Amino acid sequence: MNIALWVVQGLLAAVYLAAGGLKAVRPRERLAASGNLDWMKDASDVGVKAVGLVEILGAFGVVLPWLTGIASVLTPVAAVGLVVVQVGALRVHVVRDERRPLPANVILLLLAAFVAVGRFPG
């Protein structure tokens, strides 16, 4: 079980670091123009950067506390935070009738929930 949790934690960290990094450093207009992130057309620059920052923090939080043994309770807390991010993403996509990203959102939500439950103390 520990190996499966580490694999999922690494996968979540990679996905959220990449996605959050893009949102944090690339201009919103450029990301929206790609055609894959239509929700950004209606979002503010600050909103997109904030989502990116939350995703980056979640990426680090889902791995580093457990890896270092320093405040390891933050790993499941970060995983719960990523679940919340995906609930928000699902809501945005459903409201906008964007069905294409929904399967990825559900998979990421389930993976984050797996880490949250698997790493929760007790």
Image: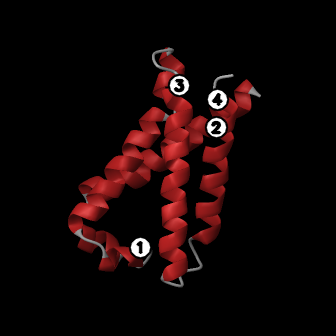
Q: Residue at x 29, y 55 (%)?
A: 50
Marks 4 and 2 close (CB-CB < 8 Å): yes
Image mark for residue 73 = 3
Q: Residue at x 65, y 35 (%)?
A: 7
Mark earlier in primary sequence (1, 2): 1
Residue at the extreme front of the image, as rendered: 122
Question: Would you name the residue on which mark 1 appears?
Answer: 37
Q: Residue at x 31, y 79 (%)?
A: 42
From this viewpoint, is residue 21 visible?
no
Quarter of image, res 28: bottom left
The quadrant of the image that shows the N terminus is top right
From this viewpoint, is residue 79 visible?
yes
Q: Residues within 10 Å of mark 4 (few under 14, many from 20)?
A: many
Question: Would you name the residue on which mark 4 appears?
Answer: 119
Q: Amino acid at mark 4?
A: Arg
Q: Residue at x 58, y 42 (%)?
A: 11
